[in-house]
């Protein structure tokens, strides 16, 4: 008898559990996130960032939620060259939302994702990053369908190594950590 791995069954159960779950879309905006970069043009750079996120999520209020996000990030200072300060990211978050008290729920978030940024004067035209997120927040149910959310995310990023072509070849490893306060709105269908 051919034994099938349980991963297919677990994936099917997870998918079926989301069919009865609520779907929501939303927008988050982060301003003044402090971002500390190790590597890049300078050896230690601290530059605030501005981020806008669009999200699509599935899950129950007061339970587990799954969220896909796309983000536009603008750094105040260039990290790899003199002009490119914009990064685009996609990520997946797992959110544990706790029971409501007076229409307010606390939440915990863990996430993973990837990003891309254009760069000049190095061995490649784009650089990719891997990111991880851990956060805390609050969700306030303002009406039957609208939620106001806010919180604080810790985000770590690690970019691909780049090779600078000068008189000698230099390889540079770059990573960053940031604390990002955010506020946003979710619409539940």
Image: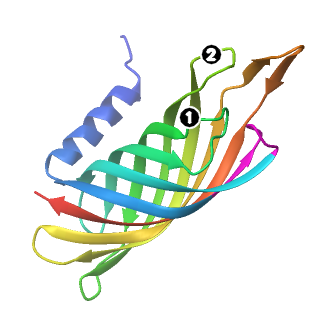
Other-residue count near label 1 (Cα within 10 Å), few / some / many at <14 / 14–19 / ≥20: some
Give me the disc on residue 53: none
* Front in this rendered view, residue 121 or 13: 121
Tell me the SS state at disc 2.
Answer: loop
Few, some or many C-alpha atoms within 10 Å of disc 2 (few <14, some 14-19, many ≥20)?
few
Q: Would you say residue 39 sits in the magenta stretch?
A: yes
The residue that mark 2 highlights is 124
**Which quadrant would the C terminus be assigned to in this image?**
bottom left
Closest to the observer, 32 or 110 = 32
Does residue 38 appear in the picture of this structure? yes
Q: Residue at x 69, y 19 (%)?
A: 122
Left or right: residue 157 compared with residue 167: left
* Percent position of residue 15, x then y: 24, 39
The residue that appears at 38% across and 60% down in the rendered structure is 29
Confirm whether residue 180 shows in the render.
no
Name the residue tied to disc 1: 84
| Start-end of magenta stretch | 35-43
Is label 2 or label 1 in front? 1
Q: Position of residue 12 (x, y in %)?
A: 26, 33
The residue located at (49%, 47%) in the rendering is: 74
- The picture quadrant where one finds residue 49 is bottom right
- Residue 42 position by quadrant: top right
């Amino acid at each position: 008898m051919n034994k099938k791995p349980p991963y297919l069954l677990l994936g099917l159960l997870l998918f079926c559990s989301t069919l009865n779950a609520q779907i929501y879309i939303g927008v988050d905006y982060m301003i003044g996130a402090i971002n500390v970069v190790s590597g890049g043009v300078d050896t230690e750079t601290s530059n605030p960032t501005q981020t806008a996120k669009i999200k699509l999520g599935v899950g129950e209020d007061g339970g587990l939620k799954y969220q896909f996000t796309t983000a536009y990030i603008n750094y105040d200072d260039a990290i790899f060259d003199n002009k490119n300060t914009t990064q685009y990211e996609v990520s997946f978050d797992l959110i544990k939302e706790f029971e409501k008290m007076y229409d307010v729920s606390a939440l915990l978030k863990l996430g993973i994702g990837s990003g891309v940024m254009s760069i000049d004067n190095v061995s490649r035209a784009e650089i990719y990053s891997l990111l991880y997120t851990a956060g805390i927040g609050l969700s306030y149910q303002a009406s039957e369908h609208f939620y106001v959310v806010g919180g604080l995310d810790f985000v770590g990023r690690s970019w691909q190594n780049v090779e600078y072509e000068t008189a000698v070849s230099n390889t540079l490893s770059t990573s960053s950590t940031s604390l990002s306060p955010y506020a946003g709105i979710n619409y539940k269908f």
